[in-house]
Image: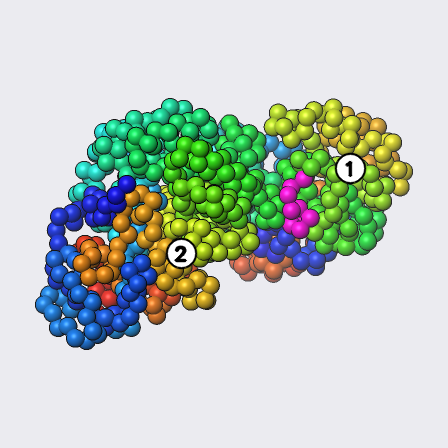
Amino acid sequence: MRHLLAIGDLERTDIDRIMERAEGFAEVGRRDIKKVPTLRGRTIVSLFYESSTRTSSSFELAAKRLSADVVSVKSTGSSIDKGESLKDTIATLGAYGPEAIVIRSPHAGAAQLVAGWSDAAVINAGDGKHEHPSQALLDVYTLLRRLGSLEGKRIWIVGDVLHSRVARSNVLAFRMMGAEVTVCGPPTLIPRDVAAALGCRVSYELDGMEEADVVYALRMQRERMRESFVPSIREYAARYQIDSRRLSPRQLLMHPGPVNRGVELSGEVIDGPNSLVTEQVESGLVVRMAILYELLTAGRPRPDERAGDTDDVSDPTPIREPA
Amino acid sequence: MTAKPISSLDWRGGGVAGGDLVLRRASVLDPRAGIDGTYDIVITGGEISALADPGSVDGKGEVIDAEGKCVFPAFFDPHVHLRVPGDEDEEDIETGTRAAAAGGYCGVLAMANTDPPVDSAADILALRERASGEASVPTGFLGTVSRGLEGGELTEMAELRDAGAVGFSDDGLPIANARLMRRALQYQHLVGANVALHEEDHDLSRPAGAHAPHLGGVMHEGVVSAVLGLAGVPSVAESTMIARDAALAAYEDARIHVQHLSARESVEAVAAAKEAGVRITCEATPHHLVLTDEEVRSLDSRFKMNPPLRSEDDRQAIVDGLRSGVIDCVATDHAPHAAEEKEVPFEEAAMGVTGLETAFSVLHSELVLPGVLDLGVLVERMSAGASPFDFDPPRLAPGSEASLVLFDPDAEWEAGADGWESRSDNSCFAGRRLRGRVLMTVVGGQVVYRQRSFAMGVA
C-alpha cells in the first residue's frame, strides 16, 4: 500500500493486515511505556481543512506513539486562510520532506490530488462527502474485537447518508468483510442510485431494523432543515432516532461522533451497554498507528536503513526505553 | 429571416478572395448539396469554380494532391467562449479562432458571459472591431438576454442587434425568471435574432438551494455521484426548463435554440416540441456524445463541465437524437480555463472543457469509424449550427463560397501531443488516440490553417 485514499482502493488482505497490526499495537497500549521507536526521525504532516477533534488528535497521538515528528497545520490562522491553493500549500510543506501527509478536506478527491503532487504517503482523513477510510477501518476493528467476524452479520447505517463520507466508506468496508448492509434514512437524505452504487439495501423506515446485529447511527446536522432535506429535527428524531425502545439488548450501537444527543441518538443509548462509541475512539488510535506503520515501513526502506543501518524494521515489537 | 453568408461575420480575412487553389482527386462529401464522389476541386476568386473529373485539372496557383483525403464543407460552431473581455489569460479572439481554424471551422459564435458581460451595443462594436483585426475565422458575438447577466431586466436587444449581435444568450446561466424569458421571446418579433438557452433549473441543480451556488451540483446525479459523494445535477434540472421554454416559444410564436443537450429527457422534450410544431433547434457537444459520468470516477477536473457528463443511456439518447435530426447540430461549448482553475479538487474546479481542435476527429474516431453514426450525417451536423442564427452553412457546389476542410481519415494522432492552438489546455480528450485529422481549412478561398506536417509535405 502506497497511500490510504479510499476503501474502494483496498483489497481484503490489506484490511486483514492492518487489523492484525492494530492488534499488536493494542498490546503496546497496555504497557507502562506506550511509545515505540518505529518511526523515529520520520516527519508526518497533518493538514486539516475542516474542524476535527477525534480524527486529528487520534492521528497525531498515533504518530507520536510511533516516535514520528508531527507538524500540524489547521486551515484557520494559516496561509490557507490567506487564499493559498492546496497545490501551493503542499509544495511549501513538501520542503520539510514529510514521509506522510494526513489530510482532511471539505472536497472529494483532495487526498488523491495531494498524492499526485507529493512524494509522501498520503492518508485521506476525510475528503468532502466521499470517503473517510481510517474511520471505516477503526469501525471494522471495533466490530471484529466484539464479534470475531463480520461474515453474514447485518449492519444498518441510519441517518443522513447523502452527506456522509463515513457511510460511504463503511458500507464498502463492512461489505468487504462479509456483512450485509442496509442504509436507512429519510428519502431526501438517501442518495439516488445508492443501492447500485455501493451494493447495499435501502430502507426509508426503521421497521425491520430488529434484524440488525449492529446499528450505526450517523450525525444529523441541523442545517439540513434549512435546506429542506427534513421538515424539522423534531420530525426526524421521531422517525429515525435510535433510542432504548428501538434497540434490543443484543444489538451493538455505533456512531462516528460527535453525537447530537437527542437527535440521532437518545442519551440513554449513548451511555448504555450496547454502545461501542468509546471503544471506537480507542480503536481509532491503534488502527491509525497500524495505518502509519503500514504506509511508512512495510515495503519501504526507512531513511537510516538507506544510510546503511541494518536494524530489522519489519519487527514492530516495542522496546522498553522511551524513544 | 434571410440567411447571410458566414464570411459576412467579422474576421481578418474579410474582403480578400485568396489565391487559386486546386485539390486533386479529393473524396468530396457534401450531403446538403448532394455531392459524394471523387473530384478535382477548383477554387478561384474565393469561390468553388468547378468540381472536375479526378486528375483532369492542372490549374494555376497551388495544387494539392488530395488523393485518399476527404473534403467537407467547413464546420460552424454556434457555441464557443473566447473569454474576451476579462479572461484573456485563458483565451482571446486570436487564439480561440486559431483553435477553430485548426479544428476545421469556418465560423464561430462567441457567448456573452464574459467579465464584464456583453450587454451593450458598445461592447458588441468593440468586439467586432477586434475580430476584424484578430480573428482567423469569421466570428460572431451574442449579446446577453439580461442586463449584466443578472436575470432581472432585458438588455437593449434592438440596439444590440443593430450593432451586429448575432443572437442573444445568458449562457452559463439559465433564464430562471419565466416572465423575463417570455418578454425576450415577445421582443424577438421586433429584434428577430434567435435566443440560445442554457437550460438548468438551479432549484434542482443546487441541492442546498438556488442561492447557494457554492453547494451546487458538480456532476450528473446517478450511481457515480452516489459513490463519490458529490452533489448531483439531476437530468430533470435540464429537461423541465426545456419544456417550459418550448411552451413559452409556442405561445409567443417565437423561436429558441437549446444549447448543449445532455440528458435523454431533454432529447425527448425537444422531440415532443418539434412534433408539436414549436420553432426549436438544439445542439449537442462532442463530450456529451462520447463520454459518460464514468469518467468522473477519476475525480479528474478535466471531466467537469456544465451540463455534466451523464449516463451511458443519456449518451446513447444524444447520439440517437443527432442521427435522427432531433438534435440539429454539433457545438463544442469550447470553454478554456486557466490551469489554476482546474488544478484543485473536483468540487472547486471551474466547469468547462476546450473542444474546437478535437471535435471532428473525436466524433470521427468514436462514432463514425465504429459504425454508430454515418459520416455524411456527421458532416452535415458539423455546420448545421449556422442555420439557427441565420447564416448559410457552407456548400461545395460550384458557385458557392469556398469554405471547406481537407481531412485525412487515416491519420493517427494523439490529442494535445503537439500542444494546442488554444491558450488553455483543459481538454477532456487530451492524450486520446484519434483517427482522422484536419489537414487544411479554407474560408472564402483563403487558407486559414495548415496542419504542420502536412504543410511541410506540400511546401
Q: Quadrant of residue A53?
A: top right
Residue marked by disc 1 = A205
Residue nearest the viewer, comparing B390 with B378: B390
Q: Magenta stretch containing residue A197, yes or no?
A: yes
Q: From the top left corner, tell me how far across and down residue B156 is, in percent.
A: 29, 26
- Image-based side of B39 in relation to B230, left or right: left
Q: Magenta stretch containing residue A192, yes or no?
A: yes
Q: Name the residue furthest bottom.
A: B55
**Which quarter shows the N terminus of chain A?**
bottom right
Q: Name the residue furthest left.
A: B60
Between the C-alphas of marks 1 and 2, the distance is 47 Å
Q: Residue at x 29, y 32 (%)?
A: B191
Give the colouring mode of the picture.
rainbow
Q: Residues within 10 Å of mark 2 (few under 14, many from 20)?
A: some
Q: From the top left corner, tell me how far across and down residue A286 is, in percent.
A: 72, 45
Image height check: is B358 above or below A204? below
Residue marked by disc 2 = B430
Image height check: is B429 above or below B190? below
Q: Residue at x 40, y 35 (%)?
A: B253
Q: Residue at x 64, y 39 (%)?
A: A162
The magenta stretch is A190-198
Whether residue B114 can be seen here:
no
- Image-based side of B364 in relation to B213, left or right: left
